[in-house]
Amino acid sequence: MGISDSYFARHFGIGERDLERYLSEALSCGGDYADLYFEYFASTVLSIDEGIVKTASQGVTLGVGVRVLAGEKTGYAYSDDLSPERILKAARTAACIASGPSKVEKTGFTESARRNLYPVLTAPIDTALAARAELIKRADRAARAYDPRVFQVQATYADNLRHVLVATSEGTLSFDRQPLARLSVMALARESAEGTPEQGYAGGGGRHELNYFLEEKTPEYFAREAARQAIVQLDAVDAPAGETTVVLGSGWPGVLLHEAVGHGLEADFNRKGTSAFTGRIGQQVASPLCTVVDDGTIANRRGSLNVDDEGEPTQSNVLIENGILRGYLQDKLSSRLTGAKATGSGRRENYQNIPLPRMTNTFMLAGESDPEEIIRGVPKGLYCVNFGGGQVDITSGNFVFSASESYLIEDGRLTRPVRGATLIGNGPEALKWISMVGNDLKLDEGIGICGKEGQSIPVGVGIPTVRIDKMTVGGVA
Amino acid sequence: MAFDTTSYEQLSADVVRMALDRGATGAECTVAEGEEFSASVRMREIEQLKQAGSRAAGLRVLVGGCTGSAYTSDLSLDGLRRMVASAVDNARITTEDPHAGLPDPADLGRHELNLGIYNDDVAALDPELKIRWAKEAEAAALDADARITNSEGAGFDSNLGARYFSNSLGFTGSYRTSSCSMSAVPVARQGETMERDYWYTVARSASRLEPAAEVGRRAAERVLRRLGARKVPTQKAPIVFEPRTARSLLGHIFEAVDGDSVYRQASFLAASLGERVAAEGVTLIDDGTLPGLFGTSPFDDEGVPTRRTLVIENGVLKSFLHNSYTARKLGMRTTGNASRGLSGNASVDHGNLFLEPGGKTPGDIIQSIRAGLLVTELLGQGVNTVTGDYSRGAAGVWIENGEIAYPVSEITIAGNLKQMLRDIEAIGNDLEFRGSVASPTLLIREMTISGN
């Protein structure tokens, strides 16, 4: 496929000559590098509440971002109008970051090697609205049918389709079509009309056809899971306070890796020397049982991309290998300045934002332990299987993640469910306490959103069952 | 149909008419316009400059009791027609909802007084001056102490916005907003450990910003205060929230009095209207009419005038916050708190939400504590509005015999919001708006600290 087949050529008549003209305008004040990010974004949100489909919303946004790099400096401007005058104006605005004679860049583009990690023939957004609305109606019914104590259900289905074109002054040109869909369910349960409600939440999705929700992960699957969690919480006791042994279940608890190490390994912080992981490449930062990977190339995953938002193909990047820190996640600016090899980690929320080094799908490779054996070996501790979000202070390295479903472990057995609690640790230290890694690596269901500098992007996490000998649990008991 | 594209107010009214022509029985259209400028500097050099503007429209239609919505950044006649068709189509797949609708016509209106939310001086600021201020703020932090060796930078941002709104009940209105802010994020080192912290100033008028050097100086003071932090033993202790962390507690209370979580009974305060929910002396007010502040507007996002609502008066829960939908669900009146982006239905948001100040200085409050924690930073989302369960990561300073003893980090504080509200023992006199939620210093009698 050449540029003439791209979405922006077909709908807006944008050709290589136009791109060259915009890039040369962007470099007219002497910038070292420039790129253009064209984005068309269409989205749908459907939601049901109290058994009533209350929200059905669709919309489109369109725009182009122009970026100019001059040494460590970035100039950025965007336009939501794709007329040549407006794009040239944005290019001139971004160009002002540099001050020097115009540089003549090579002409002509080489198209990035193409692959398709999400060969979705019909994007969910192009299917009948009624078929998508049926998903949330089914979720509502299934959550209520799970247990009579479930009294409120909200389900939301959201999909979007993004077309991007990235052209750089280095002469690379990439296009991508990025479908994404998710279904989530929130259930409230109580023992009686006077009882205190508890909530459960579940959801998932990815870069799939709508069929995924009909054949693989159905509305009933997520609805029952949300209802189950709410019912479990009805019997929960207070979480313990203080340091204890923690066993993390497989899958979504991988949010630990996202917070404890992932953010701290983003190249911008390390280039500036503000991360707790700065200067630690080659050092032991985790137990030798830990190998942590950020992989943007897994088929159909929520965090995967054919090319990142700077047009660079995504990769599988080893961050920590057998406990040793191996590398950082790079964006264009950081790799230009430090000479580091590209990792395909430059991402942005949309055309209005400057790309940053970000994660894609972050997970720990499986170990050898039997998950049940891991729990059996703990005399007293906490087994955490579901989490809400987390946060990290990358400079001190302190991070938190909040458990929403956990159980007390007493004499190697799971005894009581406990109420939600935040777990806290320090990035370069916490993973050194991992003493067992299960053979059951699982990735999350595809619901994660990561925020950085005000930009939200879809990501994935994963982890096998792991035993952490010491971690601080923020309960009250 | 001809469009007067110079007037987005007229455009929003035209879109409403198009929707009625397509079969909608009710409609409301919002057009939002924004211009942003952002400059950041790091280690005394410009790091980033960004400047751009955008606009987009959103439409919500009613077809009987069914609601549909759509939005677009394409404001051409074709783009708007597609948006109208999409919104009407969307309404056809939703369910008839007896409570759906536009506000009661009697509730519509706006304040005509000057609310001070747009000031020309923001647009008039010279970009060179903005960059110079950011540099001054960072320099003040870097120069404050030799232990401040690095920086995440400093920045100056300014935004101009406008909102235009029309509905099929004949309401048409618009207003402009301006804002500007300056921040500094220094990094300090002591031995092998590093800490960062920040300070910022934000205002609707450039004349009301704190001086750049003051922003840098306070950021430096805060980051230096964190050096040498240690964990403390797990224990129960009194907790002081300084204004920057106390305001987050008000955010959680807001979620619990948000009419949306109340009608779904997803709030620990849902059944407590008229009851004592907080300590005596605790008065929580939401006021969308205070001049020059960030939660101020002449009308809410459904065309209802904003107002002052007593949420908690002297410890007693007096009112929830509503848009027209949540009010109808509960048989109450809207409080003018409708909020909407461009897509979907309106949600509920606060105006200026604040706790009435008490009589003690923050120093008096700290002095009253034998052993406890002053929380200066909170991490994570561990708050459950349904149950009130509260568990968050924290950093701060330990108080011993009424004095600041040493910095503390890598701990959590936990409790339940229901109990925390009743356990508010002291409220400072230091109320200051730095955004739309503001709290003075607060002392909570006891929470659980998890450490080592």
Image (cartoon, coloured by chain):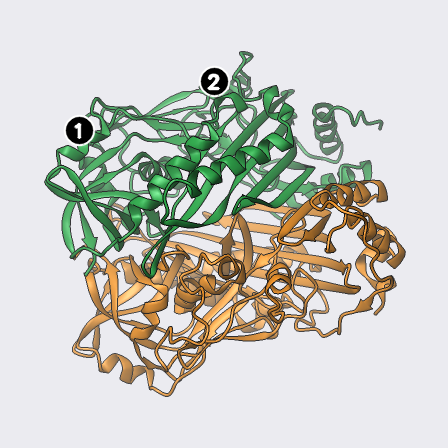
Chain colours: A orange, B green
| Quadrant in which the N terminus of chain A appears | bottom right
Instruction: Tally the numbered discs.
Output: 2
Q: What residue would you read off at disc 2?
A: B291
Q: Residue at x 84, y 27 (%)?
A: B2
Give residue A422's position: percent from left, percent from top: 30, 57
Residue A42 location in percent, x, y? Answer: 68, 52
- Which is more N-terminal, label 1 or label 2? 2
Extreme residue in the top direction: B113
Residue B115 in the figure: left or right of residue A69 = left
Residue sitting farthest toward the bottom: A368
Q: Is residue B298 above or below residue A466?
A: above
Residue B364 circle label = 1
- Mark 1 belongs to chain: B
Secondary structure category for the residue under label 2: loop
Q: CA distance from mark 2 to mark 1?
A: 31 Å
In the figure, A440 relative to B159: above or below?
Answer: below
State which mark lies toward you, 2 or 1.
1
Q: Is residue B207 visible?
A: yes
* Chain letter for the residue marked with disc 2 in the picture: B
Q: Is residue B98 visible?
A: no
| Spot occupied by residue A15 in the image (x, y as percentages of width and height) | 87, 57
Residue drawn at the location 55% of the way across and 17% of the way down: B109
Mark 1 crowd level (few <14, some 14–19, many ≥20, 10 Å Cα): few
Front residue of this view, candidates B3 and B86:
B3
Residue A54 image offset from top left, x and y in percent? 54, 44
Q: Amino acid at mark 2?
A: Pro
Circle 1: element type: helix
